[in-house]
Image: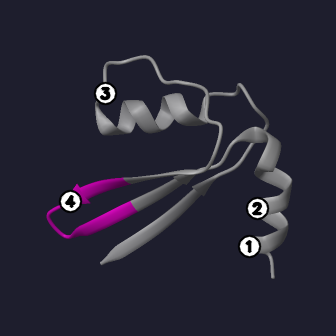
Amino acid sequence: MRKRVVLLGVGGVGKTTLVYRLLGLSTTPHATLRPDLYRLYFTNGTVEILDVPGQHATEIAQYAAR
């Protein structure tokens, strides 16, 4: 089973920090300059998280709504 999640929002609200916490990373996240794809693996499947920079959130949301 594979699930996909897209994180959208204005810049600086903590989208990348949330992903880092879910992945268990202790490093401080860097500013997201382009979309990044992260994967979480579980025994029953995978969750793919697309982290979109705030400046592209509207564009990605419009594309996804098609």
Three-letter code, disc 1 = Ala
Three-letter code, disc 4 = Phe
Q: Label 3, on which residue?
A: 25
Sequence order check: which comes first, mark 3 or mark 2? 3
Relative to 47, does residue 1 appear above or below in the rendering?
Answer: below
Three-letter code, disc 3 = Leu
Element marked by disc 1:
helix
Q: Residue at x 61, y 35 (%)?
A: 32
Instruction: Give yes or no for contact between labels 4 and 3 (Cβ–Cβ under 8 Å).
Output: no
Sequence order check: which comes first, mark 4 or mark 2? 4
In which image quadrant can residue 10 be found?
A: top right
Residue farthest to the left, as pictured? 43
Sequence order check: which comes first, mark 4 or mark 3? 3
Instruction: Give yes or no for contact between labels 2 and 1 (Cβ–Cβ under 8 Å).
Output: yes
Magenta region? 39-47
Cα–Cα span, label 1 and label 4: 26 Å
Q: Label 4, on which residue?
A: 42
Q: What label does residue 64 carry, if any?
A: 1
Cα–Cα span, label 4 and label 3: 17 Å
Sequence order check: which comes first, mark 1 or mark 3? 3
